[in-house]
Image (cartoon, rainbow, N blue to C red):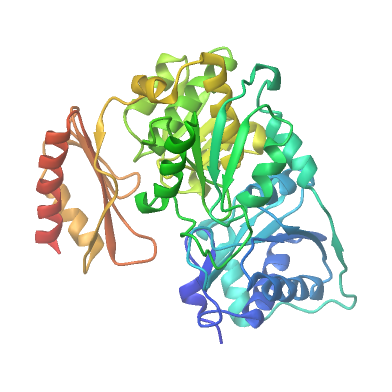
Amino acid sequence: MADFDAIFKAYDVRGLVPDQWDADAARRIGAAFAAFCGSDRVLVARDMRPSGVDLVAAFAEGVTGTGADVVDLGMASTDLIYFAAGRLDAPGAVFTASHNPAQYNGIKFCLAGAKPVGEDTGLRDIKAHAIAGDVPTAATRGTVSQLDLLDEYADHVRSFVDVSALRPLKVVADTANGMGGLVVPKVFGPLPFDLEILYPELDGTFPNHPADPIQPENLKDLQRRVLEVGADVGLAFDGDADRVFLVDDKAQAVSGSTTTAMLAASILDKNGNTGTVIHNLICSKAVPEIVREHGGTPIRSRVGHSFIKAEMATHDAIFGGEHSAHYYFRDNYRADSGLVAAVVMLELLSVTGTPLSELRKGYERYIDSGEINTKVGDPKAVIESVAAAFPDAEQDRLDGLTVDFGTWWFNVRPSNTEPLLRLNLEAPTRQECEQHVAEVVALIEKGS
């Protein structure tokens, strides 16, 4: 039997195939998801991983066994399933392991209207029913039909920009053999950009490099090509194309915080310099500063898409961003989309006429450590020992521990899946950043 405890994470299902889960597990999860949703139809899609074909077929068996119909969207990016769940007002599941290696697969779920499903909003119940196998079988099995929404999705992505304002920028996109190879050409086709795609072939074995652009080594091919062809910008998509990382015209990577700030400013300016923007608590302090400067109201959130989307719904926010390069748009059913973020950034570059290497400078005000992971025996105890070391600083427990001295701050929070503490720290200068990182890491190691 599948290792359900291992594969059910905080926000999705993910694990090794067939070692941790297989078609039988997918069938059980399909029945459990259909029962949880209570909908008469469920949307399903998959990325390019070879294992996805059999897993989707089994999942569909589980869904139809409950009497619900399955609408199979075929191969799709994760943001396409969110779009479909919003447009068709139906729950959906996309089989993808995002940036993980080839032997992994997983499922990301959403409810009708693209509402998120996380550990506290359904995953725990779905897991329990999948393990028990107690979903009753309907007297009449549901049907399976196919639907192609790719063209409608591409139109939707382009609706976020004024196409007439776009200039013929030279763009290099590295889709890393992931789903970007399907959706990027479809979206960019009618646009005036000079587009080159690296590794566009859909190949879930990832023969060129991992589809994990948050790792600097996976940006090297893109950076080299940007310089070779004199591109205005490079776009690096992850495996399921719901995230995008930018590389500027000098081949320097742009952080998720900087991109969040730039997108927020652009969207607020279009919205009459008013509106709420959600940002997670490990984003740079520059993000809320810039949001306020452009007339917006910034609100901090816990890390993770289910928390961001919930805050967006509560505050009717126009935009949300995470340091990990997830970007959420109110008019995209509050869901994240790497491609919507990409076209909005390209519109900004077109309108300003300023190279990204120059434009970014106004949005980069501090030095960040990047995420530093430390293995610890008891994450909660270590957090308490770190908190006790800074009694005079402002502290909060929104997500782990955030300690703020005004001129510098850090957050340390436990991993959802491993005995790790994740440290993010920001300071005014590189020297101060390195000094404070050494100080906090020493406290973490001492506490462990």
Q: Nearer the viewer, residue 417 or 129?
A: 417
* On-image quarter of the C terminus: bottom left
* On-image quarter of the N terminus: bottom right
Question: Could you say where residue 194 lies in the image, as x and y percent from the top left?
Answer: 62, 31
Q: Nearer the viewer, residue 191 or 443?
A: 191
Farthest residue, direction front? 228
> Number of marks in the image?
0
- Left or right side of 403 for 199: right
Question: Could you say where residue 341 lies in the image, as x and y percent from the top left?
Answer: 56, 34
- Left or right side of 98 for 283: left
Q: Is residue 220 above or below residue 448?
A: above
Q: Nearer the viewer, residue 254 or 91?
A: 254
Farthest residue, direction bottom? 1
Farthest residue, direction right? 140
Q: Residue at x 34, y 59 (%)?
A: 415
Question: Could you say where residue 264 lies in the image, as x and y percent from the top left?
Answer: 49, 25
- Name the quadrant containing residue 45: bottom right
Farthest residue, direction top? 272
Q: Residue at x 64, y 47 (%)?
A: 79
- Name the quadrant containing residue 33: bottom right
Query: In this orientation, does residue 286 appear?
Result: yes
Q: Residue at x 59, y 45 (%)?
A: 197
Q: Is residue 7 above or below residue 133?
A: above
Query: In this orientation, does residue 321 appear?
Result: no
Q: Nearer the viewer, residue 287 or 130?
A: 287
Question: Could you say where residue 90 lies in the image, as x and y percent from the top left?
Answer: 76, 52
